[in-house]
Image (tube, rainbow, N blue to C red):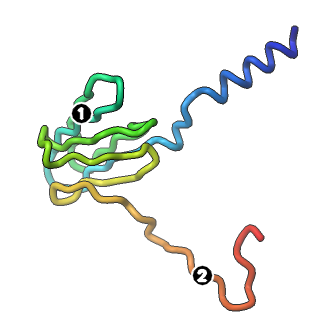
Amino acid sequence: MLGKFLIAAAVAALSFPKWAEAASITNRDAKDYKVTIIEIGKAPVDHVLKKDAQLKDVCIKGCIVRLNDSENDEYELEGTEIVSIEEGYLYYDVPDVVPEAPKEGEKKPNQ
């Protein structure tokens, strides 16, 4: 009986969404934006994203993001992106530090 419970618990844990894989949206602009998240099979959800604010854990299975109700400002996210609003547009964020390529004769990390 305990074995069946542990298997059921493991299956349940694996079926929950991985929040670390959800998208996040940061407003780096000087003004507030209305951000609409449109996920398949769900009603659109509106958020007001103030200056320097962030929406975390959105678009877990992918979505359309619309800025200020404009169909011209629609962006499709897969659910793993880290993006920001700058000058009215959505941009992918990139790390501040880009790892260097290994020098000749050096091994790559994790080898």
Measured along the vertical axis of the image, is residue 91 above or below residue 39?
A: below
Measured along the vertical axis of the image, is residue 5 above or below residue 45?
A: above
Of label 2 and label 1, which has the lower sequence position?
1
Task: Give amino acid for label 1.
Answer: His
Residue 40's quadrant in the figure?
top left
Q: Which residue is mark 1?
A: 47
Residue at coordinates 74% horizontally, 80% vertically from top-left? 107
| Residue 91 vs residue 29, the one in the foreground | 91
Q: Are marks 2 and 1 in contact (CB under 8 Å)?
A: no
Give the side of residue 13 with respect to residue 100, left or right.
Answer: right
Measured along the vertical axis of the image, is residue 8 above or below residue 53?
A: above
Few, some or many C-alpha atoms within 10 Å of disc 2 (few <14, some 14-19, many ≥20)?
Answer: few
Q: Which mark is residue 4?
A: none
Q: Which mark is residue 101?
A: 2
Few, some or many C-alpha atoms within 10 Å of disc 1 (few <14, some 14-19, many ≥20)?
Answer: few
Residue at coordinates 31% horizontally, 46% vertically from top-left? 76
**Quadrant where the image shows the C terminus:** bottom right
